[in-house]
Image: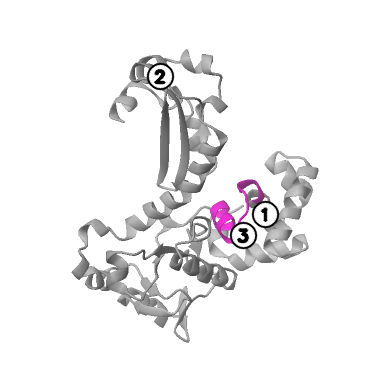
Amino acid sequence: MRVLEEDYDFDGIPGLKAAVVGDVDRPVATLSLMSESELQLTPFFQNWAKPQGLREACITKFVHTPDRIGLLGCTTRASRGGISIEEQHFLALLSPHLRRASLIGDLLDQGRVTTHLYRQALDHLAVPVVLTHANGAILHANAAAEQMFSVQGPILSRNGVLQAQNPVVARALLDAIASAASADASLGARGIGLPVSAQGQPPAVAYVLPLTEGTARAVFRPACAAVFISTTTSSSPLPEAVLTTLFDLTPAEARVLLRIGSGLSASKSASSLGIGENTLKTHLNRIFAKTGTRRQADLVKLVSDIGTPLAAHGP
């Protein structure tokens, strides 16, 4: 990487800029941006890729927070064909799991925690951590989590079950825990960066970590999932990511919901996004179906109910 930084600028590596400025979880294949003959004429290909017998790269962005960007790049050998749509789809499915590993890794560096110190380590973490059963029943809460319970938010213990104070998120949190317990692949899309703060509260984000078979689950059995709560600004997801996580929206649909939810008319929303009103109406119909709403006024209320994670960033 140091060699690349020294020899090529940001625009000098084909596909890099497109991946950085593009949507999270959307792989960018080099040959989707330019022809192979154009690629082969670039200094990067001639001086770096070709001597190593490489052909094409595909880059996916799996983390984009105010203080960092995480990228995964895969490169093919010159002896094989171009990167297929199926291979790009595979990277898109892998990307959310990389994001979860990256963000949770910030909260708990398991490489420094041995098996017999797990519980003690959790209790000394400043970050609230709750271990739960598949149905959300609380089996262990560290001191920071107990403190959060005592002040009623942003997470609560209701009849021994973990709850988010934000009612819009409460169901999504329990669904993510259930998915983690069964090692469900859908956790990748639904269990990352869940905004759990209620309206008017500082941003708070829940990350759900499956306790897979092995050391961690053996120590914490019968716990199936660990829920980490982060209140640091840098961990707050972008508003589009919040909506994508909660309602399975596409990035384009999330951007439409943010505009409509902020009170903009359909025509002004379409103009600000640079799309036609017919395209916006198509997005709106899908948004209504995914969010269980019927009118634009319902979307305004929905965005208001989600609260801080969206208002902090603006539309």
Work out whether 131 lies above or below 63: below
Residue at mark 2: 44
Where's residue 101, x and y in %?
A: 38, 54
Q: CA distance from mark 1 to mark 2?
A: 40 Å
Disc 1 is placed on an element classified as helix
Which tag, 1 or 2, sits closer to the chain's start?
2
- Indicate the amino acid at tag 2: Phe
Per the model, the C-alpha gap separating discs 2 and 3 is 40 Å
Which residue was labeled with disc 3? 247
Of marks 3 and 1, which one's residue comes earlier in the chain?
3
Label placed on residue 257? 1
Q: Quadrant of residue 54?
A: top left
Whether the residues at callouts 1 and 2 have beta carbons within 8 Å, the answer is: no
Residue at 22 percent across and 62 percent down: it is 113
Residue beneath the point at 37% across and 22% down? 8
* Residue 274 image offset from top left, x and y in percent: 70, 38
Q: Earlier in the sequence, mark 2 or mark 3?
A: 2
Give the vertical position of 221 relative to 232 (above or below): below
Give the camera-side residue of 271 and 282: 282
In the image, residue 226 lies at what x, y percent? 38, 68
Where does the N terminus fall, quadrant-wise?
top left
Say whether residue 291 is left or right of residue 113.
right
Q: Residue 201, can we see it?
A: no
Tell me where the magenta segment starts and ends, as one range: 239-253
Tell me the kind of residue under disc 3: Phe
Of 90 and 173, nearer the camera is 90
Number of residues whose C-alpha sits closer than 10 Å to that of mark 3, classed few (under 14), some (14–19) or many (20 or more): some
**Disc 1 residue type?**
Leu
